[in-house]
Amino acid sequence: MNGLEDFIQRLLPIVSNLWVLLTVSRLLDYGHGQKAFWFFVAGVFTSPLYHLCLGFPASCVWSLYKHKVMDFWTAELALPLIGLVFIDFRAPYLEKWIILTVVVVVGLLVTGTSSTFFSQAVIGGATFVVVVVYVLWHRFAHGYWPKYDWIQLSLGILFGMFGVCFFIVQDWWPPYYAYLHSYWHTFVFIASYFLAGVRDPRPQTLNLDAAIVASAIHTVVVQPNRLVEGKILQPLKIMPLSRLDSKGARVLLPVPGAIELPSKEQ
């Protein structure tokens, strides 16, 4: 192996993480900001830093073991975070705390066991069970199945299966490990991109940032007919809910069709 080929093999597992930007972009477009943050951390920081340390030891920030643990922790977050995309949360604060709980639990599981297979089995199995239970609950509680984009779902599963195949066989051919691991990164992030789009973009009224702003300044969020064939057509409008009259008293302003979010004063 010549010097150039060796350099390329060291570099490929690092730069192949850039495919995560596709997933991050779609998650942001669909209103999943907190999930996008953790994908960004995994694909732009922890995984590239681990592979940089692995390929160029002089660049290690911490020990190789610590880099590996950080990489494995954030990588294992991907599946439950994508699983939460399938669930229609009507309470943004509830989802926030669920995601934080998932981050902590996965971190404890990864650091508390020496078996990566056990961690992956528990995380994958739990994610699958939660999604299935939600789908069945939705069917019996609402009388119809959740609406998913089956093309996006099928493509996500297909690319994910290819990615898992590359991950499994990468240790069988050590001379080609860098190439196979890079394919794993590429296919799993493309799979995440499609799976992030299985539901329609979330209404901005369910966006956590919009809810915080509206609650803080006593406003309402008005969002008429934002979604047409899955495309966002109109920007979010935040309108005042009250004003001060000539005597300094607060007067509520009627806004037809608005959704009122309670202020901190209430």
Image (cartoon, rainbow, N blue to C red):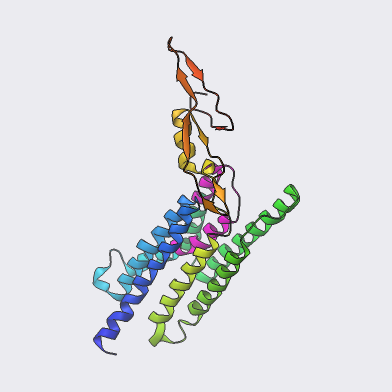
Which residue occupies the foreground of this view, 50 or 154?
154
> Which residue: 58% across, 56% down?
199
Give the farthest residue toward the top: 247
Which residue occupies the foreground of this view, 118 or 9?
9
Q: In which quarter of the image is the N terminus?
A: bottom left
Q: Is residue 95 left or right of residue 41?
A: right
Residue 2: where, in percent of width, then height? 26, 89
Numbered range of the magenta stretch: 73-100
Q: In this view, does 56 lie above or below 176?
A: above
Q: Is residue 167 above or below residue 77?
A: below
Q: Is residue 56 left or right of residue 256?
A: left
Query: What is the magenta segment's predominant secondary structure?
Result: helix
Give the farthest residue toward the bottom: 1
Q: In this view, does 240 lie above or below 32?
A: above
In the image, is residue 9 part of the stretch drawn in magenta?
no
Q: In which quarter of the image is residue 248?
A: top left
Residue 14: where, in percent of width, then height? 34, 71
Q: In this view, does 227 lie above or below 82?
A: above
In the image, is residue 75 part of the stretch drawn in magenta?
yes
Task: Please tell me how many numbered marks the rendered image carries.
Answer: 0
Residue 220: where, in percent of width, then height? 51, 32
> Which residue: 38% across, 72% down?
16
Q: Quadrant of residue 180?
A: bottom left
Which residue occupies the foreground of this view, 98 or 190?
190
